[in-house]
């Protein structure tokens, strides 16, 4: 990848969870399009490897080690990133994770953990960048939700509930900060082939995903980065408070078996 001018020329972007998966794809694309990028991640070795590689191409990328569930550490890391680059134009909150279990049986601590990892961390990160964005009278925030935040799934309430909360909080934020020229949007990926995601599914699951997705395959991190960067960029200057679904068509169906029976089952693509 070569460093070049683009939609983010001269802009400063902060990406939480930028060391791997969709976050790393965002970092690569942002830097290819001219942004200065701060990667905030718990996997600091991976974050440093990415930043060193991009720096070799002339990009301005810094890695900051942080566990986003630690409020003080997260505020410090965001403060350091803003200090390092002098401002912040774009915040992309990708860091997050999942857990499963039945509502009736789950240990309540599972909800506390996912609240802290997905929802609380997203709010704290927003709080850290908003004062700077207000001063600039511009800024864009993209919060990572999921199609899991749009519907219920058996056995997935800890994750689904937190991703749903992110959507609603983002809509509130869009209203609160619109007057300062700050946009806030949520992204809802369907199944995306990150290492973490692939580790949790079997080959049978993968084949089933192929059948339940209109495009016949799970998505790539790069495809999601493209959708996220649209929301983050000035191309989306009139887009705020929205929830962009990028799921290959998975949630476009109501999954009625009688209707599906008429659809030839195509072979899932990899
Ligand atoms: N992969 C999917 O199918 C999918 C679908 C919808 C939404 N999502 C969401 O997208 C986001 C990224 O998912 P992914 O599949 O690309 O995962 P991933 O594991 O590849 O990336 C997550 C990144 O967040 C970092 N991270 C995790 N916990 C952290 C913590 N406590 N502090 C700091 N950094 C931390 C990880 O080190 C990693 O770099 C998550 O919020 C996930 O819930 C994923």
Image: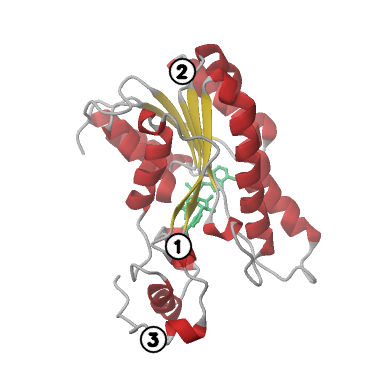
At 52% from the left and 21% from the top, the residue drawn is: 181
Which of these two is toward me, 262 or 250? Answer: 262
Disc 1 target residue: 191
* Front of the two marks 1 and 3: 3
Q: How many marks?
A: 3
Q: Nearer the viewer, residue 189 or 122?
A: 189
Dot 2: few (<14), some (14–19), or many (≥20) neighbours within 10 Å? few
Quadrant assignment, res 100: bottom right
Kindly identify which residue carries mark 2.
84
Q: Label 1: few (<14), some or many (≥20) within 10 Å?
A: many
Badge 3 density bin: few <14, some 14–19, many ≥20, Cα 10 Å = few
Q: Is mark 1 within 8 Å of ligand 1?
A: yes
Q: Quadrant of the N terminus?
A: top left
Q: Quadrant of the C terminus?
A: bottom left
Real-space Cα separation, disc 3 to disc 2, in angstroms? 57 Å
Q: Residue at x 62, y 69 (%)?
A: 153
Residue 42, percent from left and from top = 53, 42
Callout 3: SS: loop
For label 3, the residue is 262
């Amino acid at each position: 990848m070569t460093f070049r001018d683009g939609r983010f020329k001269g802009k400063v972007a902060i990406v939480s969870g930028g060391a791997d998966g969709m976050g790393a794809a965002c970092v690569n694309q942002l830097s290819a399009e001219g942004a200065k990028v701060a990667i905030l991640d718990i996997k600091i070795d991976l974050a440093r490897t990415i930043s060193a590689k991009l720096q070799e191409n002339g990009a301005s990328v810094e890695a900051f080690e942080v566990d986003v569930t630690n409020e003080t550490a997260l505020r410090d890391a965001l403060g350091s990133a803003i200090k390092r680059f002098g401002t912040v134009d774009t915040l992309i909150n990708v860091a997050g994770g999942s857990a499963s279990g039945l509502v009736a049986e789950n240990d309540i601590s599972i909800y506390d953990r996912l609240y802290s990892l997905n929802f609380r961390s997203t709010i704290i990160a927003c709080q850290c960048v908003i004062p700077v964005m207000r001063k600039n009278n511009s800024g864009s925030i993209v919060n990572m939700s999921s199609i899991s935040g749009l519907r219920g799934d058996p056995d997935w309430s800890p994750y689904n509930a937190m991703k749903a909360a992110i959507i609603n909080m983002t809509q509130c934020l869009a209203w609160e900060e619109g007057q300062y020229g700050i946009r806030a949007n949520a992204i809802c990926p369907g199944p995306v082939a990150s290492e973490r995601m692939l580790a949790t599914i079997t080959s049978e699951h993968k084949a089933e995903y192929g059948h339940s997705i209109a495009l016949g395959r799970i998505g790539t991190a790069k495809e999601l980065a493209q959708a996220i960067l649209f929301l983050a960029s000035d191309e989306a200057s009139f887009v705020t408070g929205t929830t962009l679904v990028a799921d290959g068509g998975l949630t476009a169906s109501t999954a009625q078996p009688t209707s599906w029976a008429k659809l030839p089952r195509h072979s899932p693509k990899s």
